[in-house]
Image (tube, rainbow, N blue to C red):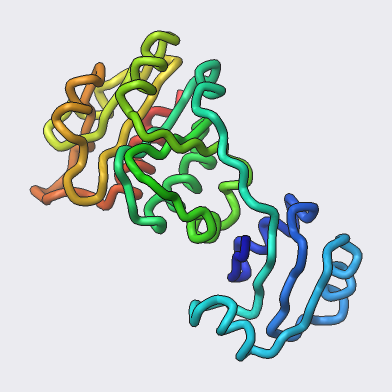
């Protein structure tokens, strides 16, 4: 798996150097930093910027690229003994998913489940999570109804984010809770909403359509942190 950009790569260097197979440098480092990296146990290769541009497919690599171990997805049923789970129902934008994973790790979520997608591209999610994905258990499950049933049977209270719900400031979250966020365009489907215990929303100062899902998710996770 190839990742690039300074922040996610340095997250791995500082927390999981053993997951890096090869570090590619397309920029100069000071001697002290280069010497430190040489002692980390992974291979380091210097490459010209043209090669880095090709490897990153013209993305902003910032002079840092790394070949890392593949991320291993989890089975969502291993989350049933946790307390705070985030479910992404049909989200497709890897930038939003990565940002939500980053927020989830910062705000006490124990596991993230992506539902309703046939294929999840892990590499850009790892990049946009700035490496937090390696600290956040992630599962993929097609059938959201089965997993919601499993969590309810395990004592979880399920919450969904949608306009017109109960103000999240007026909700006291259960100790074992699931927060479900709908997709970027349509939000939660009526069928999914009907399966949830409580629909919550964010009270806003001005009459406005909606917040970006990653922004709304961050606010809701912070307010559901118990």
Above/below status of 53 relative to 70: below
- Within the image, what quadrant is residue 160 found in? top left
- Taking the spot 49% from the left edge, 77% from the top edge, the residue there is 59
- Taking the spot 17% from the left edge, 45% from the top edge, the residue there is 186
Name the quarter where the N terminus is drawn. Answer: bottom right
- Within the image, what quadrant is residue 195 found in? top left
221 or 3, which lies in front?
3
Q: Residue 110 appears at what percent x and percent y?
A: 53, 30
Q: Is residue 103 left or right of residue 37?
A: left
Q: Is residue 117 left or right of residue 29?
A: left
Q: Residue 61 appears at what percent x and percent y?
A: 57, 76
- Within the image, what quadrant is residue 38 found in? bottom right
Q: Residue 141 appears at what percent x and percent y?
A: 42, 34
Above/below status of 40 relative to 76: below
- Taking the spot 38% from the left edge, 23% from the top edge, the residue there is 147
Q: Is residue 190 left or right of residue 58?
A: left
Total number of numbered discs in the rendering: 0
Above/below status of 69 relative to 155: below
Q: Residue furthest front?
A: 118
Above/below status of 138 relative to 184: above
């Amino acid at each position: 798996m190839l990742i690039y950009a300074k922040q996610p790569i340095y997250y791995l260097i500082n927390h999981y150097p053993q997951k890096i197979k090869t570090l590619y440098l397309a920029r100069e480092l000071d001697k002290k930093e280069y010497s430190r990296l040489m002692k980390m146990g992974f291979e380091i290769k210097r490459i010209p910027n043209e090669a880095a541009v090709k490897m990153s497919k013209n993305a902003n690599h910032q002079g840092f690229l790394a070949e890392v171990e593949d991320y291993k997805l989890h089975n969502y049923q291993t989350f049933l003994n946790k307390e705070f789970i985030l479910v992404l129902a049909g989200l497709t934008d890897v930038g939003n998913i990565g940002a939500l994973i980053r927020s989830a790790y910062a705000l006490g979520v124990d596991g993230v489940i992506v539902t309703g997608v046939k294929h999840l591209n892990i590499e850009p999610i790892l990049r946009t999570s700035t490496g937090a994905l390696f600290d956040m258990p992630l599962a993929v499950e097609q059938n959201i109804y089965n997993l919601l049933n499993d969590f309810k049977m395990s004592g979880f209270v399920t919450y969904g984010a949608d306009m017109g719900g109960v103000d999240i400031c007026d909700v006291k979250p259960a100790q074992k809770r699931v927060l479900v966020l709908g997709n970027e365009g349509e939000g939660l489907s009526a069928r999914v909403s009907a399966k949830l215990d409580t629909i919550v929303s964010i009270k806003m100062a001005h009459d406005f359509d909606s917040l970006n899902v990653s922004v709304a998710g961050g606010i809701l996770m912070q307010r559901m942190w118990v």
